[in-house]
Image (tube, rainbow, N blue to C red):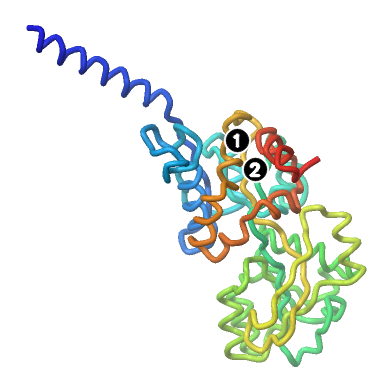
Amino acid sequence: MKIKALFAAFAIAASIGQAASAQDMSFFRIGTGGTAGTYYPIGGLIANAISNPPGSRACEDGGSCGVPGLVATAVASNGSVGNVNAINGGALEAGFTQSDVAYWAQTGTGLWEGQPAVEKLRLIANLYPESIHLVTRADAGINSVADLKGKRVSLDEPGSGTLVDAKIILEAYGLSESDVTAEYLKPDQAADRMRDGAMDAFFFVGGYPAGAIAELASQHDVRLVPISGPEVEKLLETYNFFATDNFPAGTYDGQDADVPTISVGAQLVTSADQSEELIYGITKALYNENTQKLFAAGHAKGKQITLDSATQGAGIPFHPGAERFYKEVGKLQ
């Protein structure tokens, strides 16, 4: 009977321990993008880095350096706008978005014109730059944004962040949509039109090297048009979600020199409703030394997820938990 009682006691203790573990476990869904894009694999790296399920080895013992009890998952999605809406509706705890989309959503401007602002949207981290490409045929006589006047230019699809960015850039150089023969095509469609000689230039926002542009440059003489000068300096003062950027020489075939441009950030955002302690723990885990090594080894863009870039081009308010961490490490005043 004593042995039976002992086994019963062990069973009760085990069940209590399991219940406690279940109570201590929390789930955190991160909206990314399509599985073929960059957001999804980077989201997977981040989910692994910030997770630390009950029973995991401690960070100092070679285990996870994530938030104790947290199980994070990367969820495939339609990208920036869908992620913001899902965070706002409570279907996701966090998500990836371009910094410009985050700004428009939080302020109810740009893409969000006429819609209720997502006022509770908060920034965890700026991850890596998504560069603004302005691609032109080498023989089109386009050496600056100002030269687009009267040319056939694709500004990307209606409803895209690229379209709004393209309009802002045209305006900075004293142009509008009506000053160009505007078309509204995806980058691969615009590249096809350029191959046929029916397109002079097109805008694209994304990490480099971009597949559609790399393929086009390998087959045809194209140029990247610099986006720089006093017009851009003024633009950066007006729109704080933009940052200066650069295409290194050799990024695309035929590109012999660096080309200056501007970029928007790929950002990890959340809701102000998430707890300060949780977001503090997540932010701290992102920039742990072990995590940084995993990012650098895990994806080409992972090398750019650093503490130095985390607070650049913010655009929207930081979550209090993230803000606390960045102040502690001297990245925010």
* Label whose residue precedes the other's in the sequence (1 or 2): 2
User: Which residue corresponds to the image point at 69% horizontal and 33% vertical from the top-left?
Assistant: 320
Element type at marker 1? helix
Residue 171, image x and y in percent? Answer: 87, 65
From this viewpoint, is residue 171 visible?
Answer: yes
Q: Quadrant of the N terminus?
A: top left
Disc on res. 124? 2
Element type at marker 2? strand
Of 16 and 288, nearer the camera is: 288
Instruction: Examine the image and state in which quarter residue 133 appears.
Output: bottom right
Residue 59 drawn above or below residue 266: above
Q: CA distance from mark 1 to mark 2?
A: 7 Å
Q: Tell me: 213 left or right of 105.
A: left
Instruction: Examine the image and state in which quarter residue 181 appears.
Output: bottom right
Residue 139, image x and y in percent? Answer: 75, 92
Disc on res. 279? 1
Other residues around mark 2 within 10 Å, as few (<14) / some (14–19) / many (≥20): many
Instruction: Examine the image and state in which quarter residue 53 appears.
Output: top left
Outermost residue toward the top? 1
User: Which residue corresponds to the image point at 69% horizontal and 52% vertical from the top-left?
Assistant: 101
Q: Tell me: 325 left or right of 13.
A: right
Residue contact between numbered discs 1 and 2, judged by CB atoms under 8 Å: yes
Residue 150, image x and y in percent? Answer: 84, 81
Q: Quadrant of the C terminus?
A: top right
The amino acid at mark 2 is: Ile
